[in-house]
Amino acid sequence: MKEAMPVLTAGTGLHETLALLTSQLRPDANHKEDMVFLKDVFSERSLGYLMKIHEKLRQYERQSPTPVLHSASSLAEDVAEELQTGPMSTEEKELLHLLMSPHLKAVLSVHDTVAQKNFDPVLPPLPDDFEEELDEESVKIVRLVKNKEPLGATIRRDETTGAVIVARIMRGGAADRSGLVHVGDELREVNGVSVIHKRPDEISQLLSQSQGSITLKIIPAIKEEDRLRESKVYVRALFDYTPLEDKATPCQEAGLPFKRGDILQVVTQDDPTWWQAKRVGDSTLRAGLIPSKQFQERLYAAHPSRRLAYRMKMGTLPNPKSPKKPASEGCDKENQAIVSSKCKAVAPSCGQVFSWEFYSAGLRRSFRLSRKDRQGSSGECSELGETDFLTYEEVTRYQQRPNERPRLVVLIGSLGARINELKQRVIAENPHRYAVAVPHTTRPKKPHEKDGVEYHFVTKQHFDADALNNKFIEHGEYKENQYGTSIEAIRSVQAKNKMCIVDVQPEALKRLRTAEFKPYVIFVKPRIPESRLRRSAATSPGGGEHGRLTDEDIQEMRQSAIQIDQQYGHMVDRVLIKEDSASACAELQGILERLERDSFWVPLSWVRT
């Protein structure tokens, strides 16, 4: 039985008709080659697109969208005048009030302005020599509309042919939004001006100076690339970048400046050297160029001077320009600025200085390590190897779920920050929600103390074994007794569904930044006056509890904050400037509350399953 031909109606579109026609082509013995040829032609994707475009244009033509009237404003005035000629009902008064309101008058005025204009699509006129050029090679005339924004494309000179080639299309720019310009296209003219013999900088200037409509004569690439696909890769920048200071960038104007800590959305990594990215939160649609991770690392590896400068900045090498101070002088000065002399001891094993701060809320004590005179020969004191070069860290949004353990809150502080006091005050106000990790010690238990409350009291052999097995996040010696905070102590607090708050030396951050703890790191800095204070009038930013501070003390506190920021700032989630204890406590309390309900950027490795 012969198959029936599908019925075509008046509403059947051209592209649908083409598809039906193609499906009915059945090659026979006599016309097999012709039928195969026709089927290939009708199945061509570009022909189907042309049919759809033709159909849309015909549909637009049939609809003939035109405004109902061009004089809504005058009509409204006539109605208002007519209403005022006699007595009015309540509804008529309300209508008159609406017609006389300035907002409605403005809307009607805009309506009339738009209604009197012709918005039919107008194609740009073809150049006089267009037909001649078509015989030689395919030429595309592109007209773009751009305001004061850049075109969003970079160009390069082909070393072999000398042609001006589109090197990259910036995501979200005018060129990308048009969909008419592609990587690899050859640029011939800009607004009728030939660019064949112009330098790239002259062409860039010509493009940037063009405002409003810009017409490009382009020879399309032999194989047009697909439009850029916007990725969902987000990274946290771990360094500052200023394109105008980077001589390696292919186009400084197209660069994206950013600061360390900014969250960037990398929209394409097609170019292994220069990625395209947007800052999260920016309103601009156009992406900018940033150096790729591999490119930054290659620059670092290839230039010894860069490595040396970077290591000095990060504190892993001494700066030859920095004045050296005797170790005893440094210890005394920190002692004067931060704690009293009876709360100070030097660990004989590696020369570290430990300061001791008594809790204001109870009997528990917190053990502190200082960076001063850190010249160890073994263990944690010898971690002075070359710092990894910091580029980007891939991140994602994370929000704590009800069934998850609370995130660990880590406080680090510069000289004078008094973070132990801040921690204890917050915990004392909310003991049912926040707690500290109970430290271990080898000293004898006092009569009023309970094991596991003030301290975990252990033998020296037990403590040394735990230290050897890396069970402490940090530990040290004071008056021949060992003190340390263990990882299990943190887990114990979290198992009770309480948020554990620890204050540690910045060196411990590397140990704590794990998917298990998902730490939120807060860097506490005291408010330091910008101007130098006279020695007789200077007091501690923490409220004067440590006595008067000299100009040198203030300079050391400022330098301490700078050094911690340089070495560990890339691990910090929040900087808290401590004006006084009360305001700092309130700010910290607000941060902790938001941690339980809001989402935050965290390393992708912490949540990847």
Image: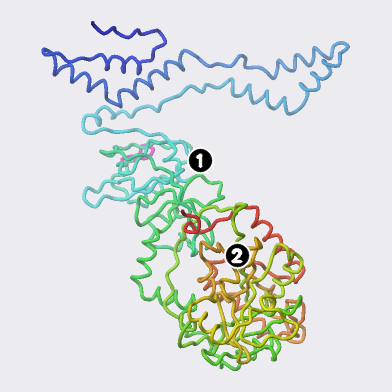
Assign a secondary structure to mark 2.
loop
Q: Which residues are magenta?
A: 188-193
Residue at mark 1 = 147
Is 557 situated left or right of 77 in this image?
Answer: left
Quadrant in the rendering for residue 500: bottom right
Q: Residue at image x 35%, y 33%?
A: 141
Q: Residue at image x 81%, y 13%?
A: 83
Give residue 401's position: percent from left, percent from top.
Answer: 60, 52
Between discs 1 and 2, the one toward the N terminus: 1
Residue at mark 2 = 408
Give whichever of 122, 28 is nearer the camera.
28
* Residue 223 in view here: yes
> Can you say whether 9 is above or below 447 in the image?
above
Tag in front: 1 or 2: 2
Give residue 594's position: percent from left, percent from top.
Answer: 66, 56
Q: Inspect the image, locate mark 2, and give the three-letter code of the amino acid beneath it.
A: Leu
> Can you say whether 470 is above or below 25 in the image?
below
